[in-house]
Amino acid sequence: MKFCWCTLMVKSMEESLKFYKEIVGLEVERTFNAGPGGEIAFLGDGETKVELICNEASKEASFGKDISLGFEVESVDEMMNFVKEKGVDIHSGPFQPNPHVKFFYVLDPNGLKIQFVENI
């Protein structure tokens, strides 16, 4: 079995696409209408995608406090500086639970925790 994508219900497709493209660095693979007032976008160039769904009838996005999406970066320190320059607040961290990994969290426009991880 192959993991295909992670689906996120988003409040604003425009804000979410901007975040995932400019901050996370994902490319839009495809977008399409999903019926009246609905839009879907798939992002990423690897095997696993991030699917964003926005529906004008339901502008709610709800995520558990213990759920996050993790993305590998070259340098946590450089990424922290980058997100700060872009006006994104650090939610928590940096953390280094062992000598081989370092990470921190930001929140996406919908309140989902996004983890940036450096493998040392």
Image (cartoon, helix red, strand yellow):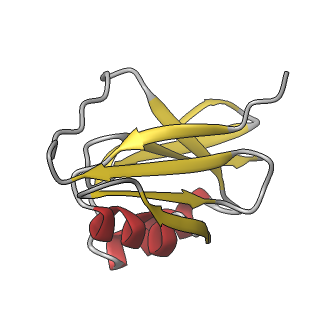
Q: Is residue 117 visible?
A: no
Residue 19 in which image quadrant:
bottom left
At which x and y percent is residue 92? 34, 41
The picture quadrant where one finds residue 75 is bottom right
Whether residue 1 is visible to the viewer of this picture, yes or no, is yes
Residue 4 appears at what percent x and percent y?
Answer: 71, 37
Taking 33 as reference, is 97 left or right? right
Residue 57 is left or right of residue 84, and the answer is left
Is 14 placed above or below 41 here?
below
**Looking at the image, is 53 positioned above or below residue 112?**
below
Residue closer to the observer: 108 or 119: 108
Give the quadrant of residue 86.
Answer: bottom left
At horizontal 17% and vertical 39% (from top left) the residue drawn is 60
What's the residue at 35%, 79% (across, down)? 85
In the figure, 67 relative to 101: above or below? Answer: above
The spot of residue 45 in percent (x, y) is 74, 62
Residue 9 percent location from the top left of the image:
34, 42
The residue positioned 41% from the left and 67% from the top of the image is 17
Farthest-out residue, front: 35
